[in-house]
Image (cartoon, helix red, strand yellow):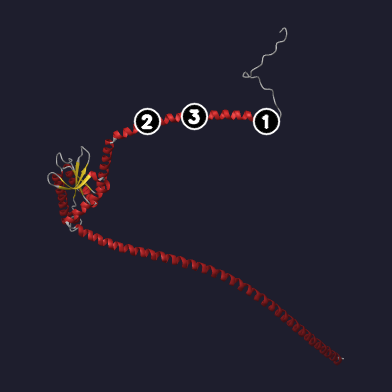
């Protein structure tokens, strides 16, 4: 019995092992099938994902290309604009450099002219001629020829640069040009001691010029009681009035008036106004006669204007009367056309025939 049971157990064990092996084989086949299906699914998913990735890459690449083209276009526009502005700026800079170069050349020429002028004015006679020419130009530009005389000789034999012929009581005013330039220039050069000495000498020069003018060009009963000292340089004139007041007071005491080109222009304009006023006064009777004739002409004009106004009013009244008559005639024509006749109204101008008398009447 034990052997039978053992044999049965072995048979059962063998059958179980076979069943297990069969089940393992089935499971292995299913596992392989599942792996194959999974591999196929993953392959299909990979293919689809690869396709999506390709489409996405192409879309991104397209958008990137479009964006890059847009950015490139903007960059090109900005660069073109920048190049254009840079070119305009460069051209403008070149033009300004050319202008500066031209101005530099003119400045160099002007510097040479100034140096030449300084060398020219270094000579005393040349300075005197320069002042006389400037004085003549100012006088000729303002006054009429009859109001002045250049290089006028006085009764004492002295010749003045310019004599102004002004109305009485002013009379003949002498104008002489003086140009104290040497010591004026020395006041701004050298040491303090040299500048102080030059300042003292400058004051002495101006005082000497004032004395010469007062002595030579102020003559009783011939010229005015004062004369004019013309200083051709505004800087020298400003130096005298700003820092040498005692010299100005001294000149006023000697009845010599120091002027520059600017202040002389004001004096000449005042003289021209005085001359114009005198000429106007000389012609005052002519002006009065002209005003009288103008008044008579205006009176005749006023009378004729009144007559014309009366004629215009009468013509207006006549026109209104004619218009009234025309309106009445038109109304009569309208009534005739519409056969709307009315018996004529009695009028005092109608001649009535005498009525026949009845018997016993």
Residue 288, image quadrant = top left
Q: Is residue 155 left or right of residue 92?
A: left
- Residue 311: mark: 3
Helix, strand or loop status at disc 3: helix
Task: State the image coordinates of residue 97 (x, y, percent, origin top left).
Answer: 36, 65
Relative height, residue 30 to residue 167 (above, below): below
Looking at the rendered structure, the secondary structure element under dot 1 is: helix
Q: Of callouts 3 and 1, which one flags the residue occurring earlier in the amino acid sequence?
A: 3
At numbered mark 2, what does the secondary structure look like: helix, strand or loop? helix
Asked if the residue at tag 2 contacts the one at tag 1, i.e. Cβ–Cβ closer than 8 Å, the answer is: no
Look at mark 2 in the image and give the residue it sits on. Answer: 296
- Which residue has dot 1 on it? 334
In the image, 166 versus 88, the foreground residue is 166
Out of 321 and 298, give the one closest to the viewer: 321
Q: CA distance from mark 3 to mark 1?
A: 34 Å
Q: Residue furthest right?
A: 1
Q: In the rendered structure, are the residues bearing label 3 and label 2 in contact, judged by CB atoms less than 8 Å apart?
A: no
Which residue of the protein is positioned furthest toward the left in this rendering? 156
Which comes sooner in the sequence, label 1 or label 2?
Answer: 2
> As displayed, is residue 84 above or below residue 312?
below
Q: Closest to the observer: 184 or 33?
A: 184
Q: CA distance from mark 3 to mark 2?
A: 23 Å
């Amino acid at each position: 019995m034990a052997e039978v049971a053992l044999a049965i157990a072995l048979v059962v064990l063998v059958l179980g092992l076979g069943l297990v092996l069969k089940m393992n084989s089935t499971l292995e086949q299913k596992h392989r099938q599942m792996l194959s299906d999974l591999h196929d699914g993953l392959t299909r998913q990979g293919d689809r994902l690869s396709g999506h990735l390709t489409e996405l890459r192409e879309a991104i690449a397209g958008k990137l290309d479009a964006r890059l083209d847009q950015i490139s276009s903007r960059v090109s526009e900005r660069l073109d604009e920048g190049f254009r502005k840079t070119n305009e700026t460069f051209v403008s800079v070149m033009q300004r450099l050319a202008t500066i170069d031209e101005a530099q050349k003119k400045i160099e020429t002007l510097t040479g002219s100034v140096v030449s002028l300084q060398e020219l004015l270094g000579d005393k006679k040349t300075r005197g001629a320069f002042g006389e020419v400037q004085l003549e130009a100012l006088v000729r530009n303002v006054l009429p020829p009859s109001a002045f005389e250049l290089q006028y000789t006085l009764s004492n034999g002295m010749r003045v640069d310019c004599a102004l012929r002004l109305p009485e009581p002013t009379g003949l005013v002498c104008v002489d040009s003086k140009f104290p330039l040497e010591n004026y220039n020395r006041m701004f050069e050298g040491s303090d001691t040299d500048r102080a000495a030059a300042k003292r000498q400058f004051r002495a020069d101006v005082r000497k010029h004032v004395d010469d003018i007062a002595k030579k060009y102020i003559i009783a009963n011939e010229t005015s009681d004062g004369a004019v000292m013309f200083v051709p340089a505004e800087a020298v004139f400003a130096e005298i009035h700003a820092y040498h007041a005692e010299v100005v007071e001294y000149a006023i005491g000697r009845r010599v008036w120091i002027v520059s080109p600017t202040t002389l222009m004001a004096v000449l304009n005042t003289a021209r106004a005085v001359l114009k006023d005198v000429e106007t006064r000389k012609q005052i009777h002519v002006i009065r006669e002209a005003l009288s004739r103008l008044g008579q002409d205006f009176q005749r004009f006023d009378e004729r204007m009144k007559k014309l106004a009366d004629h215009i009013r009468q013509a207006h009244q006549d026109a209104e009367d004619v218009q009234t008559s025309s309106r009445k005639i038109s109304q009569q024509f309208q009534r005739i056309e519409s056969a709307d006749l009315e018996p004529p109204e009695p009028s005092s101008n109608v001649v009535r025939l005498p009525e026949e008398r009845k018997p016993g009447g």
